[in-house]
């Protein structure tokens, strides 16, 4: 009886920490994958990319740091897979200094491993990081090569075949932002999408996603909100391109721990409220 | 005079920027592009200012014998260590073209081996604090808190497969009670309405503050009084 009382009224925070640790580690160890059906906002972005004609020019902007890698990396991977499968050209850049390493990681883990036939400078290019935040977007809108005089490896921008047709941001067919804060999707919409009527797609952390709903569907083609959005996008991608059935399930695997952890948090909220009302009645 | 010149500069530059956006004929569009490049170059210098400020504040605290001076030393050593390793491009080919992520560079090793895991570890501890806070603070203490709690509960449930399966058995005419439906509607309507109101409010605030700056009403950035 005492144990029950303690559990109800004075749940030690160490018990909560252990419960969360187990909720995260057990599904991760056993690769408990959670496939999810794409929601309309995710499907809408998938369809927008599908509708682009082959060899479309797409910016993939990596605007996140190491702290949100588990949420953002699967999004970037899924975009890279989808774009290259559709034979689009990817222009990879970063508004965040920490984004450049994530950009490299996508090239190493997805493009080089899964698309060995794709050629650097023809199918994809690493433009890298530039300082300036939304000011950079503003400059790129008018004069792209004024800011990117070289690619991320120091090669002259005019020596890269896929850069020859680029002068301003308006030359791009779509901008995809994988981000976790400012500058991110919102800035891309305000400084590029709205001004140049360039379609924008967002893939952001769950916390950030709520702030972007006002832009959907007119200013934002679609949105991947958090790990769930990424898992839904993977489902859409795998159902259309089954070759990614094995390699393209990062978010679905990470969704296992997140789903169980969310259930634990829900139980804790219920427990907290039960103890509150029982305690109130006793008084 | 010390204040008049900055005020004149702000007035001219601010007015020109506004004109450059709204006037589509030469020289304004080209001028906007040119000034944007200046802005980006200036922003690059802000890194130097930020770094200098960090060193000054940290060194000052160490000198005064701050109780956390060990951590302050870690900050300084980390700052100068990364700066030195990055500038000298240690461990990599001499001409790596400024690409700090080149294979073999010490900068990349430190980034991958220390910086990234530390950032990820600190961020992941949030899960523990959030769950503990959910138990202690998320309670239906009054009407407003109950509305918030119910909305949060639906959103959390909607973010799990459990939410889908819990209400999947409901017939179609009760589909408005299904968790995925509620989840989507909460995000699309009350959330969007609130966010729009905040966004419009912020935008109006920025416009009014910008006008105050351009017209010289707001002068606190000069380090003096507000007239």
Image (tube, rainbow, N blue to C red):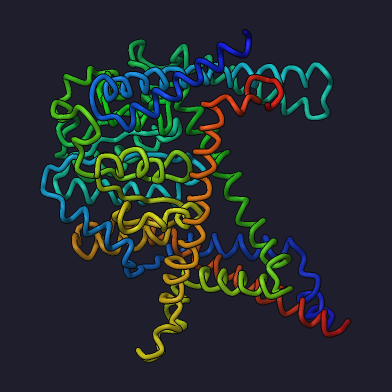
Report the front residue among B55 and A222.
Answer: A222
Q: Exactly how many numbered labels are in the figure?
A: 0
Q: Residue furthest top?
A: B1
Q: Residue furthest left?
A: A54
Report the front residue among A65 and B151.
Answer: B151
* Relative to A24, residue B208 above or below: above
Residue B159 in view, yes or no: no
Residue B216 in percent (x, y) is at 57, 24
Direction from residue A157 to residue A271 in the image, left or right: right
Direction from residue B197 to residue B2 in the image, left or right: right
Q: Quadrant of residue B2?
A: top right
**Quadrant the C terminus of chain A occupies:** bottom right
Residue A181 in percent (x, y) is at 48, 44
Residue B169 in view, yes or no: yes
Residue A175 in percent (x, y) is at 28, 43
* Relative to A176, residue A93 above or below: above
* Relative to A254, residue B5 above or below: above
Image point (25%, 40%), residue name = A196
* Relative to A183, residue B155 above or below: below
**Quadrant the N terminus of chain A occupies:** bottom right
Image point (42%, 83%), residue name = B176
Q: Quadrant of residue A25?
A: bottom right
Report the front residue among B218 and A249.
Answer: B218
Residue A271 in percent (x, y) is at 69, 76
Q: Quadrant of residue B182?
A: bottom left
Image point (35%, 32%), residue name = A137
């Amino acid at each position: 009886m005492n144990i029950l009382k303690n559990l109800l009224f004075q749940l030690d925070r160490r018990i909560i920490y252990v419960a969360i640790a187990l909720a995260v580690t057990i599904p991760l160890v056993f690769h408990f994958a959670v496939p999810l059906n794409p929601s309309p906002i995710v499907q809408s972005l998938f369809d927008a990319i599908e509708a682009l004609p082959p060899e479309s020019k797409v910016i993939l902007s990596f605007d996140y740091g190491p702290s949100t890698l588990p949420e953002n990396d699967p999004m970037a991977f899924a975009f890279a897979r989808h774009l290259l499968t559709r034979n689009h050209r990817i222009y990879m850049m970063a508004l965040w200094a920490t984004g450049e390493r994530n950009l490299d990681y996508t090239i190493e883990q997805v493009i080089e491993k899964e698309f060995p036939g794709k050629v650097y400078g023809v199918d994809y290019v690493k433009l890298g990081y530039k300082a300036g935040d939304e000011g950079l977007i503003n400059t790129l809108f008018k004069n792209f090569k004024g800011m990117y005089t070289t690619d991320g490896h120091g090669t002259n921008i005019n020596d890269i075949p896929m850069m020859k047709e680029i002068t301003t941001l308006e030359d791009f067919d779509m901008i995809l932002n994988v981000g976790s804060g400012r500058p991110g999707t919102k800035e891309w919409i305000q400084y590029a999408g709205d001004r140049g009527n360039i379609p924008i797609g967002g893939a952001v952390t769950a916390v950030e996603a709520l702030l972007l709903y006002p832009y959907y569907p007119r200013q934002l083609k679609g949105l991947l909100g958090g790990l769930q959005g990424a898992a839904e996008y993977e489902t859409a991608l795998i159902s259309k391109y089954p070759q990614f059935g094995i390699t393209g399930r990062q978010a679905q695997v990470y969704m296992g721990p997140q789903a169980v952890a969310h259930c634990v948090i829900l139980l804790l909220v219920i427990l907290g409220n039960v103890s509150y009302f029982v305690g109130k009645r006793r008084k | 005079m010390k204040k008049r010149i900055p005020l004149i500069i702000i007035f001219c530059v601010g007015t020109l920027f506004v004109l450059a956006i709204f006037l589509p004929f030469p020289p304004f569009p080209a001028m906007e592009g040119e000034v944007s490049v200046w802005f980006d170059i200036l922003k690059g210098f802000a890194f130097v200012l930020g770094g200098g400020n960090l060193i000054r504040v940290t060194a000052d605290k160490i000198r005064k014998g701050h109780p956390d001076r060990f951590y302050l030393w870690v900050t300084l050593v980390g700052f100068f260590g990364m700066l030195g390793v990055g500038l000298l491009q240690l461990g990599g080919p001499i001409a790596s073209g400024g690409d700090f992520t080149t294979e073999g560079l010490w900068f990349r090793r430190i980034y991958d081996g220390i910086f990234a895991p530390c950032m990820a570890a600190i961020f992941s501890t949030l899960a523990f604090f959030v769950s503990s806070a959910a138990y202690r603070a998320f309670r239906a203490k009054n009407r407003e808190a109950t509305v918030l709690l119910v909305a949060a509960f639906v959103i959390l449930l909607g973010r799990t497969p459990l939410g889908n399966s819990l209400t999947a058995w409901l017939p179609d005419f009760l589909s408005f009670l299904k968790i995925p439906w509620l989840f989507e509607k909460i995000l699309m309507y009350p959330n969007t309405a609130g966010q729009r109101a905040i966004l419009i409010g912020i935008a109006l605030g920025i416009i009014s503050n910008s006008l105050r700056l351009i017209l010289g009403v707001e002068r606190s950035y000069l380090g003096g009084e507000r007239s």
